[in-house]
Image (cartoon, coloured by chain):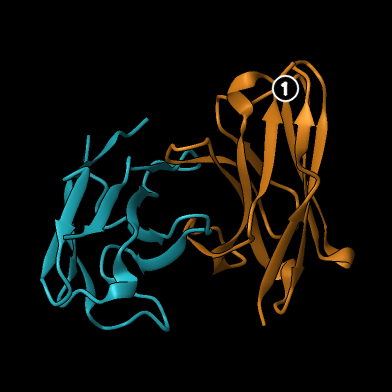
Amino acid sequence: DIQMTQSPSSLSASVGDRVTITCRASQSISTYLNWYQQKPGKAPKLLISAASNLQSGVPSRFSGSGSGTDFTLTISSLQPEDFATYYCQQTYSTPRVTFGPGTKLEIK
Amino acid sequence: QVQLVESGGGVVQPGRSLRLSCAASGFTFSNYGMHWVRQAPGKGLEWVADISYDGNNKHYADSVKGRFTISRDNPKNTLHLQMNSLRAEDTAVYYCAKDLGWILLRRAFDMWGQGTMVTVSS
């Protein structure tokens, strides 16, 4: 299976900050990479598919980039509702897709 | 609106069985692949199983292969997960999720249910 890692595992930031979360795959996955946001006690929400495609209804302050093994999720200006845990997911190695361990974004 | 509602979770002893259901509404269920994804308490996400739009193709995580069976009833807009020989490590919130792709599986999950908790304990 393809292993996914994320850094940092947790992050403290303030409203208005620019934040970048990194996801790395153990082998090249082209752009078969999705990002999810999960708030406590809630189901995950798909933010970005295929590395950089913003899902309908997701604010434009979210963006994704990368290909191969290294990917980033950027939030250009943090809003209070953005504090959550973020997961990356590879869909290159199907059907056994795998998620990263998550990055918890907390309020500073 | 698009909605997925899981049911069937609960507390069960090791070795016993449980059947989860997911009722779908607000979209053409028969045109989309579906998935089960689980999350152990305080842990990350784990894909469990998927099924094609017509039910003819199914895949499982190694951790549940041979014990879990995914199925769907398109006329009733319902997804199921039959879980047999349950183990303590199966304890998790189980989510059903809709595939992003129309007909073809893309394995990005664009709609999730609220989840149902399964606890395996003696």
**Residue B46: where, in percent of width, then height?**
49, 39
The residue located at (82%, 65%) in the rendering is B77
Farthest residue to the front: give it.
Answer: A108
The residue located at (40%, 49%) in the rendering is A91
* Chain coloured orange in the rendered structure: B
The amino acid type of the residue labelled 1 equals Leu
| Relative to A2, residue A13 above or below | below
* Chain coloured cyan in the rendered structure: A
Camera-side residue of A14 and A35: A14
| Relative to B27, residue B89 above or below | above
Quadrant where the image shows the N terminus of chain B: bottom right
Camera-side residue of A18 and A95: A18
**Residue A56: where, in percent of width, then height?**
42, 82
Q: Quadrant of residue A12?
A: bottom left
Quadrant where the image shows the C terminus of chain B: top right
The residue located at (53%, 35%) in the rendering is B40
